[in-house]
Amino acid sequence: MLERAPSQVKQILVTGGAGFIGSNFIDLVLESNHGVSVVCLDSLSYAGNVVNLESAVKHPNFAFVKADLCDGDGLGSALDPFDFDWVFHFAAETHVDRSIHEPKITVMTNVIGTLNLLEYFRGHWLNEDQCHKRLVHISTDEVYGSIQDGLFSETSRYKPSSPYSASKAGSDHLVTAYFTTFGLPTLTTWCTNNYGPRQHPEKLIPLMTIHALEGKPLPVYGDGLQVRDWLHVHDHAAGVWQTALRGKVGEGYCFSGGLESTVTNLDVVNQILGAVSAHLKVEKSELDGLITHVEDRLGHDRRYALDSRKAAAELGWTPKVPFQSGFAKTVEWYLNNPEWMREVQGTDYKDWLSRNYSQPKGGHQ
Ligand code: NAD
Ligand code: DAU
């Protein structure tokens, strides 16, 4: 459950709410804040799916608007009928591998799309009482790049490695600039890798689960010893909400799983194989041979890790879902939702698998 918003907050906008984190966030807001109406704006790109909003669409306080952030005029007409108090900006092109194949699409949405959103609210909130207004921009630990030991924090230097993380860095700078230059009440959040239900199957956990279930090779990039600091999506959603509730405008907050960053991709894949073998009632050793080391991701960051002490001290946020049980329930969710799995694996997905996994990556030496 999320805390109650203050009484002035009547209507909120969630961009990218048909995706993984946005849809989980919307469900939590609708469950816990009955007086708040929620509008989801999403272009329904390959990564967005209305099935993710199955519960939300039944709720009387929910509305869906289809619009593309890259179309500034269309965005204006889509948002004009509403009067938003809080804005949560999740929409983005989020897959690192896709950003390597098609950097321009990623940059357009993440930079120009964010710029259009900021411009819209600069115009709309300018002459209003902005006291309770908040625009929370959802960023990522990837903007800081890879860290060998220790943790990055809110004041660490940006050193993005991929077109995805560079475009998120660009959007972060615009968000901060709109606070500094125009006084727009923005806040930024940086988060480590999320896991939970409804993640697009191009990402590690659902992809490996589907492949294991279907007896297909599990494509581990390079040696598989890269480390991610996994955080349950509900914990991330709570952090984003607390940021609007308690955060200081113009500032930012880091959220991490606090796993001491020791879980490697191979550990994750082995845990998935354990869960899938139990589901199929076979020995795990029968599936171990599916693990296949493939060519590494270009510019692959080795390790991510964030320090969330500021979020704990100023927002009262700490992660609640333990990794072991949260992870087991997540894999179980994918195994128990074959229809969802089918729905999100359309033609585009099959085309993506053949583009990313059967062609040489061709980076610099
Ligand atoms: P996702 O790919 O599952 O969903 C993205 C959503 O944005 C989709 O519904 C898509 O249709 C929509 N979208 C894309 N382009 C759009 C456009 N031009 N106009 C309107 N809508 C558009 O992403 P996610 O994993 O839920 O990530 C949400 C946010 O959280 C992103 O900003 C991402 O950078 C950030 N983040 C993600 C993680 C993670 O582990 N998944 C971790 C940290 C931060
Ligand atoms: O760190 C936060 C980021 O986490 C978010 O900003 C991104 O939007 C989100 O996609 C995620 O990025 P990653 O690149 O870390 O996630 P992904 O699931 O793509 O990959 C996780 C790790 O698994 C990474 O080290 C690459 C590896 N991997 C991934 C795939 C898809 C493989 O080894 N094989 C694969 O087939």
Image (cartoon, rainbow, N blue to C red):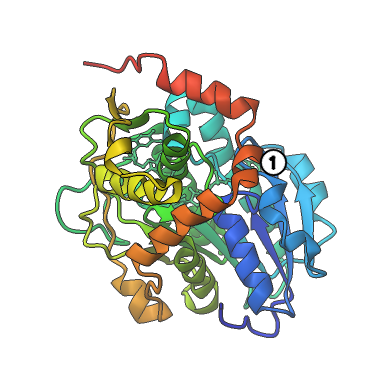
Quarter in which the N terminus is drawn: bottom right
Q: Is residue 87 visible?
A: no
Compare residues 86 and 295 and report the one nearer the observer: 295
Q: Position of residue 74 (x, y in %)?
A: 78, 41
Which residue shows up at 37% across the image and 28% down it?
217
Compare residues 162 and 268 and report the one nearer the observer: 268
Left of 72 or right of it: where is 104?
Answer: left
Image quadrant where residue 280 sits:
top left
Image quadrant where residue 68 sits:
top right
Quarter in which the C terminus is drawn: top left
Instruction: Kindly identify the amino acid type of the residue bearing the numbered disc 1.
Output: Leu
Residue at mark 1: C-beta within 8 A of ligand 1: yes
Q: Is residue 6 visible?
A: yes
Q: Position of residue 266 (x, y in %)?
A: 26, 42
Q: Which residue is mark 1?
A: 44
Q: Position of residue 124 (x, y in %)?
A: 73, 60
Which residue shows up at 52% across the image and 55% down it?
333
